[in-house]
Image (tube, coloured by chain):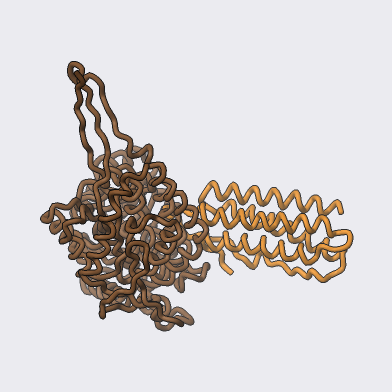
Amino acid sequence: MEIKNLKNYIANEWVESKSKESLEVRNPATNEVMARVPLSTVEEVGEAVRAAQEAFQDWRETTPYTRARYMFRLKNLMEERFEDLAQIIVREHGKILDEARGEVRRGIENVEVAAGVPSLMMGYNMEDVSQGIDEDCIYQPVGVFCCVTPFNFPSMVPLWFLPYAVACGNTYIVKPSELCPMSQNILFELFDEVDFPPGVVNLVHGDKRAVDALLDHPDVRGLSFVGSTPVGKYIYAKAAANGKRAQCQTGAKNCLVVMGDAVLDKTVPSIMSSVFGTAGQRCLAGALVIAVGDVYEPLKDKLLESAARIKVGDGLDETVQMGPVVSQKSLDRILGYVEKGIEEGATLLLDGRDIQVEGYPNGYFIGPTIFTDVTSDMVIAREEIFGPVLGVIRVDDFNEALDVIHDSPYGNAASLFTSSGKWAREFKYRVRAGNLGINIGIAAPIASFPFCGMKDSFFGDLHGQGRDAIDFFTDRKVVISRWF
Amino acid sequence: MDLATFGAIMSFGLDLEQQAAAFYEIAARGALEESFANLAKSARKRAVRMERARREGIAEMILEPITGMDGDDYHLELTPDADEAELLRQAIALEETTQRFYMDAAVKIPVREVARTCIRMAQESERRRAELEKL
């Protein structure tokens, strides 16, 4: 198999990095090296920013209708290359084809929403705010933006930002995850086909050095980040210190509360997809099930029965329901948490550690793993494991369930399973988390809604996607006028 | 083969249509030429529809495990070099099988839009079978 050296895309040219440092990109199902990703230099980041800055003025003067047409072209190309986009996600990330297709679909939906920019970017006005005086609020693009994105949704997450930024008249740089960078190279092949003016969209591979170069560059006006909480805090602080706007979606430890009146036959499949989908490597993944009262025992039995049936393997096999985790390092970290859970006294109800996937002896596989008798003070209940490991906590009542949720530093997502409108309303009203599910295990906002988050799960005020994205990528300017 | 995911069901349907198209194309001869050629064309169109439904109907929020469907229950033995009477019998069996598959899939698939597509496919298969039985 040919090992590809990934290139940067700057000012509509595929450019080989001059950096001598690179990392291997491995298929997590087979451990085969598929590509090498360069760790670009500070100078190369500078070239991308310069190209984006030079493109900005002409691009902002391009009418929103024309900019929207670029989005239509991009959407059409993504539909044509849909399976290619999905398959590369599976090969570099390990998730199953259905999940990869879902990721591509959500990416396309963001492009579709951004294509509405002629309406989304309209300002507002009022006549006669005082005698003969009118006031207008206009939306204007800002300049060069960039994103630093994670491995777990390598194709979609940049599309929470880029289409909106570019449709609003800004220019853009993507710095993808060095673990899963290939999806963005395919997407940029489509950008190249769309034929944006040079410098409007740019791709620079790299690591922390590239991120720091973006954060330090005076021409970068803002940055979007999705990843871990420590890195998000660092980026947010540094962006603020350098006068840039930033939105940082970070870690999570999401709770799924199951009330005694929940419809268990519908609840359990939803929990399965939330906890074990993408092998638990979603920031919206359920990590803790909080069973309220007597539902604990029947729920535990059903969870075990369903999780034990999940077929683990290479995500390209459509009969497989859960793929490997992304890297050996991730696998080792997850296995460490399983050890920790045992040490802490939780009961290992389902042990996924010794799973063997026939024909894939070198893949980073771990099977569905369930701990019961978990208490909220345990490390496995407090820290983000980011793997297919579920902890089940028993509480006496709804208020105690909320206490467990609120005891966590995170506030990304939370779900409630119930048949009661009263509990659903209480949950919506009181829970301090940004994305809530009522009888939904994966509370994933669709493109026209913001991807929310609170507490240590989000740093910033405007989120990715939807109306928030338009506000993030524009300046508001008020014009007060009087004519004599 | 367990059809335990949305993609597995949709891809199985897509394969059925491609198999049907190939069968009707090769078997279109003699008294069956015109009707089988039309069925082949229709199967190609249905394959495109299934691919589109798989691509556009996927919804991450409800990607839940599916149970109770097995591809072996819809296994077909098609021999397009058989005589015309046998070809007709196989075509009728093919349409019965696809109708049954899509009716079963419509119940299992959690996305209503895609389930409607499956029902439409099943209804078409039923009509096609009825037409074949008149030949």
In the rendered image of the structure, the colour used to display chain B is orange
Q: Does residue A84 lie above or below B43 as drawn?
A: below
Chain letter for the brown colouring in the rendering = A
Quarter residue A297 falls in = bottom left
Q: Does residue B82 lie above or below A60 as drawn?
A: below
- From this viewpoint, which residue is outermost toward the left? A241
Left or right for A363, reference A56: right
Q: Quadrant of residue A478?
A: top left
Query: Along the horizontal axis of the image, is A372 left or right of A446?
Result: left
Counting from the top left corner in percent of width and height, residue A430 is at 24, 42
Given residues A305 and A335, the one toward you in this image is A335
Q: Residue at x 26, y 74 (%)?
A: A39
| Residue B4 location (% of width, % of height) | 52, 63
Q: Quadrant of the C terminus of chain A?
A: top left
Query: In terms of depth relative to the viewer, which is nearer, B53 or A125?
Result: A125
Residue A285 at least partly seen: no
Q: Dividing the picture into quarters, in which one does residue A27 lie?
A: bottom left
In the displayed structure image, the side of residue A438 where residue A412 appears, left or right: left
- In this rendering, the answer to whether A50 lies above or below A7 is above
Q: For the view shown, which residue lies furthest in the top direction?
A: A131
Q: Residue at x 79, y 69 (%)?
A: B80
Q: In terms of depth relative to the viewer, which is nearer, A365 or A4? A: A4
Residue B89 higher or lower than A402, as above or below: below
Let me know if residue A25 appears in the view. Answer: yes
Q: Nearer the viewer, residue A86 or A356?
A: A86
Q: Position of residue A215 (x, y in %)?
A: 18, 60
- The residue at the point 65 percent across, 48 percent down is B120
Q: Residue at x 44, y 72 (%)?
A: A312
